[in-house]
Every structure is written in structure tokens, then in C-alpha cells.
Image (cartoon, grey):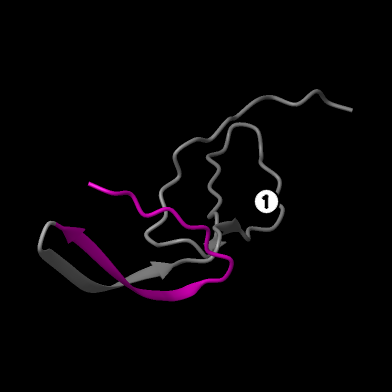
Amino acid sequence: MKKFIATCLIAGMLMFSTSMFATQQTATQQLTIVVATSLVITSTTPPAAVVGQAYSYQLTASGGVAPYVLFNCLMRRLKHG
């Protein structure tokens, strides 16, 4: 087994041909990799919350590969003032 390691500098389709060689044998295959743009959170500042009322805010993002999943949300109380 051999690893293919590359750093893609632009998003899009990366098409390449690869070959493996062994004693008296050669195998070649055309491959395509989809290179996504970087994931960016595009949400603006959320609206103010009201004490004692449920709060909901929709995060938005672009780039990356959808569907997006929120995997960590840290909540903390800020000091008044």
C-alpha cells in the first residue's frame, strides 16, 4: 500500500493518473478528488436574549462539504457591565 499526500491550493476538481508497478505488471487508474473550499461560519451577531424566555439562533456557514453539524457549543454567562 502507498499513500498519496498532496496539498491543494485551490478548490475544484483534482484529476490525476496513478500507476502501481510490480514484477512484470503495471496497473494505471484515473482518479478524481473533489477539493472543497474551507468551511467558514457566516452568521452575524445574534440578537439579544431575554431572561426567562427560550432563545433560538440559526448559525449559517459556507464552503466545506454539507451537511454541516454543530459539534461544540460553549455557553457561559458574561459579567454585566
Q: Which residue corresponds to the image point at 71% horizontal and 46% vertical from the top-left? A: 48
Front in this rendered view, residue 61 or 63:
63
Q: Is residue 35 left or right of residue 9?
A: left
**In which quadrant of the rendered view does residue 75 lie?**
top right
Q: Is residue 7 left or right of residue 46?
A: left
Front in this rendered view, residue 75 or 11:
11
Q: Which residues are magenta?
A: 1-22
Q: Which residue corresponds to the image point at 42% horizontal and 76% vertical from the top-left? A: 13
Q: Residue 43, position in %: x, y?
A: 63, 58
Q: Secondary structure at mark 1?
A: loop
Count up the numbered dots.
1
**In which quadrant of the rendered view does residue 17 lie?**
bottom left
Whether the magenta-drawn stretch holds residue 4 is answered as yes
Image quadrant for the C terminus?
A: top right
Q: Residue 58, position in %: x, y?
A: 53, 55
Q: Which residue corresponds to the image point at 55% horizontal and 54% vertical from the top-left? A: 59
Q: Residue 29, position in %: x, y?
A: 21, 72
Seen as rendered, the residue at the extreme left is 24
Q: Amino acid at mark 1?
A: Pro
**In which quadrant of the rendered view does residue 80 lie?**
top right
Residue labelled with disc 1 = 46
Whether the magenta-drawn stretch holds residue 33 is answered as no
Seen as rendered, the residue at the extreme front is 24
Q: Is residue 79 left or right of residue 54?
A: right
Front in this rendered view, residue 66 or 49:
66
